Amino acid sequence: MARESFPRPIGTRRRFSALLAATALGVYLLLIVGATTSLTNAAASCSTWPTCHAPIDPLNQTELAIAWGHRLTAVVVGLLVVTTAATAVLGDTSRNVRATLVAAAVLYVVQIGVGAVTATTGPAAILPGLHLALGLVIFSGVVLALAWDLEIATGSDDDAIDSPEPLADLEESVPTASERTLPASRLARARLTAFAYFQMMKPRLMWLLCLVAAAGMALAAGPGLEIYTIVATLGGGVLAIGASGTFNHVLERDIDQKMSRTADRPLAVDLIPVRNALAFGLGLTVLSLGAFLTINRLAAALGLAAIMFYSVVYTLVLKPNTVQNTVIGGAAGALPALIGWAAVTNEIGWPGLALAGVIFLWTPAHFYNLALAYKDDYARGGFPMMPVVRGETVTRKHILYYIAATFVSTIALAWITELGALYAGTVVVFGGIFLWAAVRLHFEQTEAAAFRSFHASNAFLGAVLVAILVDALAF
């Protein structure tokens, strides 16, 4: 896309970006409500259009309310789409943005017609899935327009690092083993060593990945989920995460010394001998597989695959060699969803795959924020992260792309499973917070804004996983 420059005041740019973001979120809400309407068969309670007649059966009142909610939401979102397209046509926007939003508005009118035919004559009267497909195309178009407009309004072409300078005098700021003053007390030294082993297990990753596995189990078992399955699966998962983190510390110990955020890791400062760390990682691996094997072999195989993928494929192959390391590496975080599902069913099913897809697509939208905040550090470490290789503008744009892809995957999960209103409300509310933080990052472009978007991504996924747990186990 050719870069165009527009002299719009910052306030005007922000208002149009806010309108675009609100429109994208509105279409997303409509798709989620549509999925809920389909799952509850609420459309069957309203076979007239544009209004719904009251059902004879009073038991259908709830379904009628859901159907009405879908249609009223469609009206509000339609007004947003038309307003956004008109603003783009009349305002100072790029040709691509205008064309995309006008096409989205036209497709919205077509979608209304498809919805009317589907409501009055039944879903078999028209191509199955066409209504949803049009909604996804409209949503994608609005997000693309948002990303392009923000790129033009706030981006630059010279923010990639061509030849980062080495980190100077790092050895003076982080003491080596010979310079480190260890505590005189044996107990204090034992505590320091124990905490170092704990650090190698990367405990900050555990809560979210355990939530992913728990959500997979909840989707598979529902209210019948057994305590032993929970304990064995999460126990094996914690040990597997610890093993992966330990091997990562071993393999990146030399590079960690070059980066300020990792220079004080236990192996980087020689606090833990490499042979001890390897033995610790292997021990955690054996214990993890032992825990998984008490459930079934498939869960154990997936657990071993997760350890190997993160430790070898991601750490040694992807991370130092390709700008797509974060994208492909998202498979490591997605595997716990399959482990949770397999722990209950002893197979890999579509709901488990759909949940894994949510995690896989969320990972770049999440981690690119951290890559922006630590851009210079990753450059010093020699890692080809997106901001280092392609620049900050492209990275911010890709965050929006992957947020949109994540939103689409949450819609797919809603269609495949029987998740209800709690899930729908959670993904929309926290999705809106995540999108708002990503849009704000385009205008602020600071480390604080990157961390804000990073934390918003954590909040989004954490809330969605909790909603899945509650929805699947309690309703």
Image (tube, helix red, strand yellow):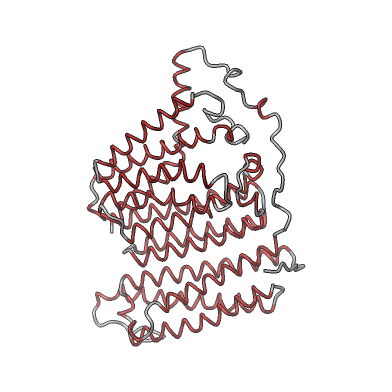
Vertically, is 161 above or below 350?
above
Count of numbered marks = 0
- Name the residue located 28 percent from the left edge and 37 percent from the top edge: 290
As drawn, which residue projects farthest toward the top?
A: 184
State the residue in front, 294 or 313.
Answer: 313
Q: Quadrant of the C terminus?
A: bottom left
Q: In the picture, which quadrant includes the N terminus?
A: bottom right
Residue at x-position 51% and y-position 69%: 26
Q: Is residue 161 left or right of residue 120?
A: right
Q: Is residue 177 left or right of residue 222?
A: right
Q: Position of residue 181 (x, y in %)?
A: 57, 16
- In this rendering, position of residue 52 left or right of residue 23: left
Where is residue 11 drawn, in percent x and y?
70, 64
Looking at the image, which residue is at 25% across and 77% down? 58
Looking at the picture, how far across and down is residue 374, in whole percent? 62, 43
Front residue (pair 312, 100): 312
- The image quadrant of residue 205 is top left
State which quadrant residue 17 falls in: bottom right
Give residue 372's position: percent from left, percent from top.
62, 49
Q: Residue at x 61, y 47 (%)?
A: 384
Residue nearer the viewer, 64 or 224: 224
Toward the right, the furthest residue is 7
| Nearer to the camera, 245 or 111 | 245
Q: Is residue 216 above or below residue 417?
A: above
